[in-house]
Amino acid sequence: MPRLALVPGEPAGVGPELCVRLAQRTRDYRLTVFGDAGVLHAAAARLGLPLTLVDARGGSATPGELAIVEIPNEADAVPGAPDARNAVAVIGALERAAHGCLAGDYDGLVTGPVHKAVINEGGIAYTGTTELLAAQAGCDVVMMLANDIVRVALATTHLPLREVADAITPAALERTLRILHRALHDDFRLPDPVIAVLGLNPHAGEAGHLGGEEIAVIEPTLAALRHEGLQLQGPLPADTAFLPGKLRGYDAVLAMYHDQGLPVLKYSGFEQAVNITLGLPYPRVAVDHGTALDLAGRGIADPSSLFAAADTCARMAIARKAASATDPHG
Ligand SMILES: NC(=O)c1ccc[n+]([C@@H]2O[C@H](COP(=O)([O-])OP(=O)(O)OC[C@H]3O[C@@H](n4cnc5c(N)ncnc54)[C@H](O)[C@@H]3O)[C@@H](O)[C@H]2O)c1
Ligand SMILES: N[C@H](C(=O)O)[C@H](O)COP(=O)(O)O
């Protein structure tokens, strides 16, 4: 049974209550939560749900129970009102859980939402958990969000729009496409995945009249990788690439920047979508939503994305174990 590390994220957001709801489920994976016991007990009491936190190596699969690695907060967590003094505990929980995955103590990492501004206000430079985990593991990664309708990967992640064009270099795009292709092949069992690559500019640059990145960077990179056999379409105009009839022909869409791809993904199915970090040595799957401070503590936040994240992470962990058992080099 996969052993998953679970991190609730911002203690004043919806993360803790969603973890309590996840704990209630009958599940075929073990969970160990990294966080503050008091915050989780308070969330359970508000929801009127049972929660037992135990010291169990490898995690618990018993409904109503979680194993815990306690990481106490500095300040009281008031739902809806984050306190920057808790930034150290929030990031510490992520780092310790991820370290446990790297050490082989856990088979995957499931994370709740983190409030980026609050972490920075707490004195920690942080652009996102994807970037934090990549730096800790020392590898290149790709952010991909997925639901039953579409998989959207990003060529750039949490970057000011002003810096996006300069970040899309042939080397960076090639790295991204290789990681995406490999993950679709290995983790999603797609033998010959088709990736649609969006242009950066309106109408994919209109033959160079509306921007030069397609001709200078994207087209030559795709051409070189097609020679190796990768199935790549594009650069495609982003405004029509997501039409349902076209989407059926792709296994994933690579968007050039965060808000080129994610609004479509979230519009098409916010509840069940998850955020997967491709390229790490372990599976990491997060919710697709943020801290939802407007809902925190009210018991009405939808837990579907966290449920989907845990289920996806468990499936990926099982698939990776099976693959490494049959791989003579694994
Ligand atoms: N996985 C992550 O760590 C993650 C993802 C997205 C945003 N964020 C961060 O979260 C913070 C708040 O971001 P935001 O306000 O743009 O987005 P948000 O997702 O927190 O909220 C957007 C809207 O969606 C609703 N919503 C969100 N989650 C919901 C749920 N589970 N059930 C029902 N409704 C839900 C909210 O009530 C709100 O109306 C920011 O700091 C952002 O960077 C973190
Ligand atoms: N880009 C993500 C989203 O919009 O859902 C998000 O902000 C969080 O990503 P990380 O978990 O990698 O910080």
Image (cartoon, rainbow, N blue to C red):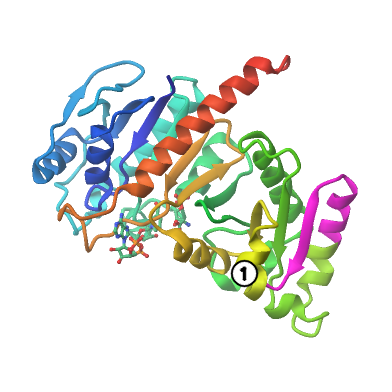
In which image quadrant can residue 210 be found? bottom right
Residue drawn where x is 15% and y is 43% of the image: 43
Of residues 151 and 258, which is closer to you in this image?
A: 151
Residue type marked 1: Leu
| Vertical comparison of 63 with 88: above or below | above
In which image quadrant can residue 7 be found? top left
Q: Which stretch did the figure color magenta? A: 220-237
Percent of width and height locating residue 151: 58, 53
Percent of width and height locating residue 55: 24, 18
| Vertical comparison of 284 with 160: above or below | above
Q: Quick check: is 105 in the magenta stretch?
A: no
**Residue at the limit of the structure toward the bottom, as seen here:** 209
Could you tell whether 293 is left or right of 216 in the image? Answer: left
Could you tell whether 166 is left or right of 137 in the image? Answer: right
Could you tell whether 250 is left or right of 134 in the image? Answer: right
Residue drawn where x is 67% and y is 46% of the image: 180
**Residue at the limit of the structure toward the front, as seen here:** 245
Q: Quick check: is 227 in the magenta stretch?
A: yes
Disc 1 element: loop
Percent of width and height locating residue 325: 63, 15
Crowd around label 1: few <14 · some 14–19 · many ≥20 (10 Å): few
Q: Which residue is mark 1?
A: 243
Residue drawn where x is 54% and y is 44% of the image: 277
Of residues 134 and 206, which is closer to you in this image?
A: 206
